[in-house]
């Protein structure tokens, strides 16, 4: 099930595809959304020398934007949603590592983090992309008033430095500019009451129960990351 913002991205890609005139040099359309909810589209440019895919054309349109959070490509002649090629996956991972990609799985549309589409990836250490940390909208007020200054993540990499905190409401995104000050790895069963209190809770057991609802695969010996952050200013 796609959220309303994700559906908007898909609709934009479909509309872009419908605008094509049948020229076989342009057979795929893509759309992407940034953290402010703006949408950018592009089409492929086929050429025997290696023209760009639609996803890369959309990235060019979004060059002046912040980090992208959703990407999708759709093909002509009834192909529907198609997954990005290997090159596009590597470019997305290098430039927008927190982007999710809409794909079809057994006929149903879903979103997958780009890092999950490219396992055992090459890591380009020369890139320093803006990062995005996603939150359930229930945490917006507590993050905004600084009663929540940490988030615990499982199999969800973050990085120290500037980041957008993205709150995914049903019909829109809200974002806050922040700085991730430190990331503390530990075992799930070593979470402390202090960790829980930084998240606006009281005791470790309550935080652990909440994390089990977010991450059903988490186990006692699983590694989690305690991500400490501060909000820089009120954003939109």
Image (spheres, grey):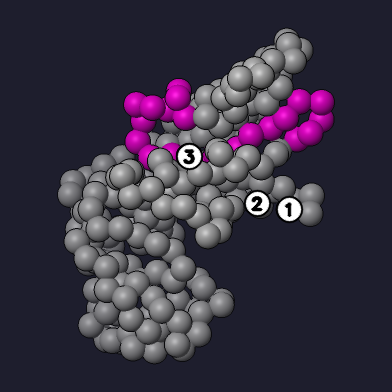
Magenta stretch holds residue 3: no
Q: Are marks 3 and 1 in contact (CB under 8 Å)?
A: no
Closer to the camera in the image, 88 or 214: 88
Which disc, if any, is residue 105? Answer: 1
Label 1 element class: strand
Q: For the magenta stretch, what is the residue range? A: 59-80
Residue 50 in the image: above or below residue 189: above
Q: Which residue is mark 3?
A: 91
State if disc 1 and disc 2 touch (CB < 8 Å).
yes
Can residue 102 be seen here? The reply is: yes
Which one is in front, 205 or 178? 178
**For discs 3 and 2, the disc positioned in front in the rendered view:** 3
**Residue 105 drawn at (x, y percent):** 73, 53
Residue 46 located left or right of residue 96: right
Return the x and y of residue 148 as percentages of the image width and height. Answer: 26, 66
Label 1 CA crowd tier, 10 Å (few <14, some 14–19, many 20+): few
Q: Is residue 59 above or below residue 119?
A: above
Q: Give the labeled residue for mark 2.
A: 110
Q: Residue at x 56, y 53 (%)?
A: 118
Q: Is residue 136 left or right of residue 165?
A: right
């Amino acid at each position: 099930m796609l959220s309303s913002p994700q559906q908007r991205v898909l609709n934009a890609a479909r509309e872009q595809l419908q605008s094509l005139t049948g020229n076989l040099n342009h057979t795929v359309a893509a759309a992407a959304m940034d953290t402010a909810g703006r949408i950018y589209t592009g089409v492929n440019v086929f050429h025997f020398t290696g023209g760009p895919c639609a996803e890369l054309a959309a990235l060019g349109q979004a060059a002046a934007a912040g980090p992208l959070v959703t990407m999708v490509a759709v093909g002509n002649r009834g192909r529907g949603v198609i997954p990005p090629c290997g090159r596009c996956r590597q470019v997305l991972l290098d430039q927008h590592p927190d982007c999710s990609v809409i794909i079809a799985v057994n006929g149903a549309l879903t979103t997958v983090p780009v890092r999950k589409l490219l396992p055992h990836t090459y890591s380009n250490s020369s890139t320093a992309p803006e990062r995005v940390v996603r939150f359930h909208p229930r945490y917006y007020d507590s993050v905004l008033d600084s009663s929540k200054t940490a988030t615990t993540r499982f199999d969800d990499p973050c990085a120290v430095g500037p980041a957008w905190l993205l709150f995914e409401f049903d019909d829109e995104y809200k974002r806050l500019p922040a700085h991730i000050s430190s990331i503390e790895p530990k075992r799930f069963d070593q979470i402390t009451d202090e960790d829980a209190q930084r998240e606006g809770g009281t005791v470790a057991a309550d935080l652990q129960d909440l994390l089990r609802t977010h991450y059903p695969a988490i186990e006692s010996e699983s590694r989690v990351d305690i991500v400490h952050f501060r909000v820089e200013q009120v954003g939109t």
